[in-house]
Amino acid sequence: MSRRSSAKPPLIRQRTRHGAKQRAKQVTGPVRSSDADPRWMDAAAALAGRGRPLSRPNPAVGAIIVKNGAVIGRGWTAEGGRPHAEAVALAQAGPAAQGATLHVTLEPCAHQSERGPSCTSLILNSGLARVVVGVQDPDPRTAGDGLAMLRGAGIDAQLMPSRSATRSLAGYLMRQRHGRPHVTLKLALSIDGCIAMADGQSQWITGAAARAHVHAERARTDAILVGGGTFRADAPRLDVRLPGLAAFSPARWVLSQSGTAPEGWQVLASPRDIAGLADVQYLFVEGGAQTAAAFLSADLIDRLLVYRAPILIGAGRASLGDIGLAALPDAHGRWHVVERRTLGSDTLEVYERARPATDCNT
């Protein structure tokens, strides 16, 4: 929004020291936009990815401090959630932060914890002239108060809604807004949509490059899940087998109503029970067909990874079971493709569930 814009500033909810909400008020102040802001926010969102998944239980946030067109500080949420991205970037910038601009994917926290001061207080003491925020924090302890405090102190603080920042925070936003993890479903298929031969042979449909990509995706998640049938038939390891990333192997879950699982595994009785997975922001579902269908039927899949190999199987096992589709028109408009790429001889298509703009994929 330009300085001369007639648009009204956003409503910021104010709270008393005891947490009670007061009447929302408009916070005014100078707002300067820059053509470079989206580019710097995209860069901050890319940095945020470096914090996954070890930032849990905190969100993985990215921050970049820019002065005269040059980066003087950058950071992402550290392992265990502290220090925050803004604190890392400010420490790197040092005194040079005076008069600079901070681009940060999530609104700086406004509450102090036993683990350290709020990022808002650090910014107030840094000399920063401007702060650009990609996503307002839905956490009720902040929820607009960080921006309001910065503006109240004379800092040019701007909320610039960013798709890349929102995507980088998908797991955190899903947890805050809907009380469950962000869920990715992985499917490895033949051209004709089979995930295995009729006798169950499935190793390997895709090639080495596609499988390495799957391992990289596993390393970015908090937990991974398969169905009981896949567990019994394949005895999957579900770890990360890439050099230097073994420590990033996610917690392993099996969907089963038996209530029992071997050592190193945990049991989930129903897809809707994912709400109870403590500190899990990102869940990776690897099938099989009935498990994938169960999650899709419950509308709990937010992202689809479809790896397709250039092979035909014929009378093989289908990738999905019944997902409760009553009429063909109901299938349209639910998914949109966000990425296509080639992985060796295979292809990858990434889809996101079409949800309201206030949700967690857009």
Image: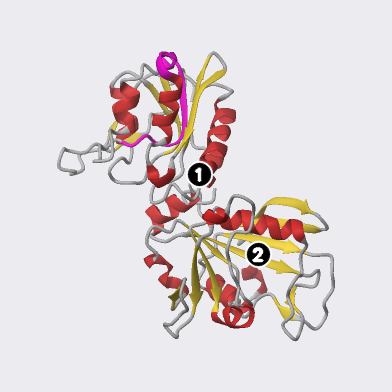
**Which mark, residue 107?**
none
Closest to the observer, 321 or 277: 277
Above or below, 94 against 332 in this view is above
* Residue type at numbered disc 2: His
Estimate the x, y position of residue 16 in percent, counting from the top left: 17, 38
Give me the residue at 47% from left, 78% from top.
262
Give me the residue at 57% from left, 56% from top.
246
Closest to the observer, 201 or 241: 241
Estimate the x, y position of residue 234 in percent, counting from the top left: 64, 78
Whether residue 131 appears in this view of the structure is no
- SS at circle 1: helix
Whether residue 259 appears in this view of the structure is yes
Disc 1 from disc 2: Cα separation: 24 Å
Q: Is residue 291 left or right of residue 213?
A: left
- SS at circle 2: loop
* Residue type at numbered disc 1: Thr
Estimate the x, y position of residue 180 in percent, counting from the top left: 42, 61
Tell me the residue that label 2 is attached to: 332
Which of disc 2 and disc 1 is earlier in sequence? 1
Q: Is label 1 or label 2 in front?
A: 1
Closest to the observer, 321 or 356: 321
Tell me the residue that label 1 is attached to: 166
Give me the residue at 40% from left, 58% from top.
178
Q: Quadrant of residue 328?
A: bottom right
Q: Check disc 2: other Cα within 10 Å, few if <14, some if 14-19, many if 20+.
A: few
* Residue 303 in magenta stretch: no
User: Residues in magenta?
Assistant: 94-109
Name, please, the residue furthest toward the left.
Answer: 18
* Residue 95 in magenta stretch: yes
Q: Quadrant of residue 227?
A: bottom right
